[in-house]
Amino acid sequence: MLLEGKKGLVVGVANKRSIAWGIAEALHREGARLAFNYQGERLEENVRSLAAEQPGSAVFPCDVTRDDEIDALFANVKQAFGRLDILVHCVAFAKKEDLDAEFLATSRDGFKTALDISAYSLTALAQRAAPLMEGGGSIVALTYLGSERVIPGYNVMGVAKAALEAGVRYLAHDLGKRNIRVNGISSGPISTLAARGVPGFTKMLQHVREHAPLPRNTEPAEVGDAALFLCSNLARGITGEVLFVDNGYHVMGM
């Protein structure tokens, strides 16, 4: 029960196969009480159904592109929990046309959309979370190797993840004085709803299985346990880091 008595908010659960849900299961297993968001009616039923599996959880609407909805989310969390110990950011989006074409063809609007939802939203959420983390807390964001290496088809999402990782470091600096730690997890490719929108994703899974030091694909539960570590007191001296959970694929040159 590493997180007994802790309160957390997991942003970005879409369905049972989400990495976000794998993280939520690990946090709940170790005693955390969690809140979740959903964006629009299309996802509400899925999120509420999953949250029902965790007694004591709470579910609130929030579109991370709208400041008023982010404000309302944290007001609801404060009312429900009183404080916050953990924030998990699992939000990313890019327009399909900006993934299908070359990065060279990225539109201005597509660039702004990807950076706003995938990178700036971490800062927006951290701004509201920090006042609820009196005495300290942990913020964890999901990223991917495409932030530092070219992954064909990942395109503008790679640029957005690079911005997200820079945000992790700057937030770690700003929030460290409040004993709030900020870290990222760079997961290997996992067959989620969002990932399947990346062109050539099936080949990506196969390539990782064939070339990673541990020759298999990453499971959501593995990312969940890594997030559990970063959110627990076991990682109390770690901030501003990106932890790879990709079966070692990122160390390979060929």
Image (cartoon, rainbow, N blue to C red):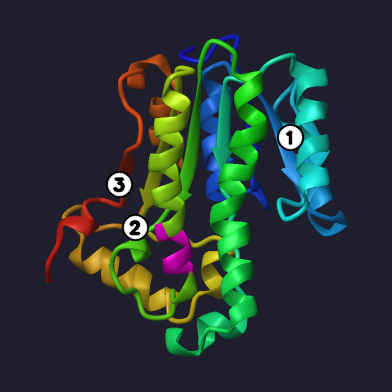
Q: Which numbered disc, 3 or 2, marks the residue that appears first in the sequence?
A: 2
159 inside magenta stretch? yes
**Mark seen at residue 51:** 1
Q: Residue furthest right?
A: 41
Residue 142 percent coordinates (x, y): 47, 48
Q: Is residue 168 left or right of residue 38?
A: left
Q: Which residue is mark 3?
A: 244
Q: Is residue 130 left or right of residue 3?
A: right
Q: Nearer the viewer, residue 7 or 210?
A: 7
Q: Secondary structure at mark 1?
A: helix
Mark 3 or 2, which is nearer the eye?
3
Q: Quadrant of residue 225?
A: top left
Q: What residue lies at 58% left-to-right and 20% top-to-bottom? A: 85
Q: What residue lies at 49% left-to-right and 18% top-to-bottom? A: 178
Which residues lie in the magenta part?
A: 157-162
CB of mark 2 within 8 Å of CB of mark 1? no
Q: Do we see residue 230 in this rendering?
A: yes
Q: Which numbered disc, 1 or 3, marks the residue that appears first in the sequence?
A: 1
